[in-house]
Image (cartoon, rainbow, N blue to C red):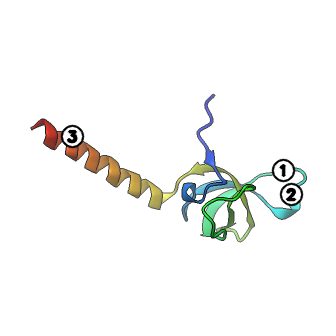
Amino acid sequence: MEDKSSDGRIRKNIQIGSEVEIVQKHHQRTGELTDGIVDRILTKSPNHPHGIKVRLDTGEVGRVKNVIDFGPQAWNFYKDIEFSSVQNLNNSLT
């Protein structure tokens, strides 16, 4: 089965509202993952080798290992790009 998750080390892959899997500080040794919805992105840099630090809507803080779903803000962004691409294609055919 193909892995459809995105890399949690790159900030642009993560949006507020994204569904992610994080490793909390006290689970670093075991690698236990906690899933949830991003409430706030805490890492300011564009990337981090151990994952972008986020706070989930439950208040838990950890570094993102996988982005499961991009969230509503990202989907609206991509939907707008797709719509404009289709519209441009239709205009070029007429």
Q: Eyeballing the image, is 68 above or below 92?
A: below
Name which residue type carries label 1.
Answer: Gly
**Circle 3 sits on which residue?**
89
How far apart in space, not on screen, are marks 1 and 2 (Cα)?
Answer: 6 Å
Residue 61, horizontal then vertical, whole percent: 74, 67
User: In the rendered image, which quarter is residue 35 located in?
Assistant: bottom right
Check disc 1 and report its element: helix, strand or loop.
loop
The answer to whether the residue labelled 1 contacts the one labelled 2, judged by CB atoms less than 8 Å apart, is yes
Label count reads 3
Check disc 3 and report its element: helix, strand or loop.
helix
Decide if residue 73 is on the left or right side of residue 2. Answer: left
**Circle 1 sits on which residue?**
31
Q: Residue at image x 63%, y 36%?
A: 3
Mark 3 nearby-residue class (10 Å; few <14, some 14–19, many ≥20): few
Compare residues 37 and 50 and report the one nearer the observer: 50
Name which residue type carries label 3.
Answer: Leu
Q: Residue at image x 63%, y 28%?
A: 1
Direction right: furthest residue: 29
How far apart in space, not on screen, are marks 3 and 2 (Cα)?
Answer: 49 Å
User: In the rendered image, which quarter is residue 2 located in?
Assistant: top right
Check disc 2 and report its element: helix, strand or loop.
helix
Which of labels 3 and 2 is toward the front? 3
Q: Residue at image x 53%, y 53%?
A: 70
User: In the rendered image, which quarter is residue 50 located in?
Assistant: bottom right
Ranked by sequence position, the earlier of labels 3 and 2 is 2
Which of labels 3 and 1 is toward the front? 3
The image quadrant where one finds the C terminus is top left
Name which residue type carries label 2.
Answer: His
Decide if residue 68 is on the left or right side of residue 74. Answer: right
How far apart in space, not on screen, are marks 3 and 1 (Cα)?
Answer: 46 Å
Residue 8, horizontal then vertical, whole percent: 65, 53
